Amino acid sequence: MSQDRIYAQPHGAVKDFAFDEQVADVFNDMINRSVPGYTTILHTLGKLAPRFAKSGTRIYDLGCSLGAASLAIKRSVDIEGVELIGVDSSAAMISRAERQLGAYKGKVAVSLKEADIRDIAIENASLVVLNFTLQFLPPEDRDALIGKIYNGLRPGGLLLLSEKLVFEDNAINDLLCELHWDFKRDNGYSELEIAQKRTAIENVMRPDSPQIHLKRLGEAGFSHSQLWYQCYNFASLVAIK
Ligand SMILES: Nc1ncnc2c1ncn2[C@@H]1O[C@H](C[S@+](CC[C@H]([NH3+])C(=O)[O-])CC(=O)[O-])[C@@H](O)[C@H]1O
Ligand SMILES: O=C(O)C(=O)Cc1ccccc1
């Protein structure tokens, strides 16, 4: 897997960030060096998946990228009769995910679809994963997606929702952003790379506050929801139907 050097040279006018071939090629390196807690969250997904997966049900990985969350599920769920559906709107991501997941033999049947997660049906789900995907949907489409997930989950089913966060308190928001940029510096990104990536994602990735996430989950019908992990301005929540 190649190193992310996408924003290493001056770009002049920085284009909006897109999940194209260039990004897909370096995505594993990019997400590991950019998202504090990414490995911890996937490790914990490997603990959650066998607790919630049931034979005769489906698991959805929405915005699956290269299939890292699907792989964590496939590795940890050792029962027959579970169907894992990975969905991503990027053709570049789906073709690489096919290769990565095909190489691992397990009991869970995996099918990958190139589709918009706003357009697919969600049915008979024991587990739904939104690992850093909701933040890329237009804010006005987020309530409907969480509602569709709630309706598609079986009673007792789990939603794992990981997101970058924004904080209502400006002093706290600035401090946690600074700590995230320190994390990126420590992982070898230059000031130019950090600044250009920031411009590129400004219009395409709009984080919500923890309060907005919990309110949205409650309004969708989830009566149990909790933030279970946070590192700086990155977090993961669980919600149980
Ligand atoms: N409307 C949409 N429909 C389908 N896919 C979408 C949509 N919008 C964005 N995506 C897809 O959501 C993914 C978000 S990355 C997820 C990481 C992964 N979950 C992981 O566990 O490694 C997170 C990040 O880059 O910060 C990309 O692959 C997009 O193509
Ligand atoms: O890189 C960043 O600054 C982020 O906020 C996380 C991220 C990771 C991968 C793609 C887009 C954003």
Image (cartoon, rainbow, N blue to C red):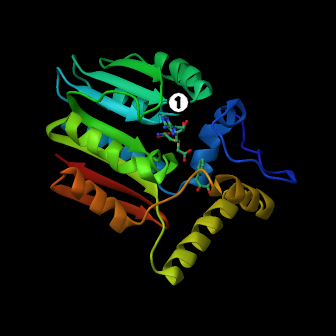
Mark 1, ligand 1, within 8 Å: the answer is yes
Instruction: Tell me residue 77's x, y (percent).
Output: 28, 28
Under mark 1, the amino acid is Ser
Instruction: Tell me residue 187's x, y (percent).
Output: 66, 57
Q: Residues within 10 Å of mark 1 (few under 14, many from 20)?
A: some
Quadrant in the rendering for residue 199: bottom right
**Is 144 placed left or right of 223 in the picture?**
right
Q: Residue at x 67, y 46 (%)?
A: 17
225 in relation to 19, above or below: below
Is any part of residue 118 visible from this angle?
yes
**Is 56 placed left or right of 205 in the picture?**
left
Question: Which image quadrant: the N terminus?
Answer: top right
Q: Which residue is mark 1?
A: 89
Q: Residue at x 30, y 57 (%)?
A: 216
Q: Residue at x 41, y 66 (%)?
A: 209
Instruction: Tell me residue 30's x, y (percent).
Output: 64, 45
SS for callout 1: loop
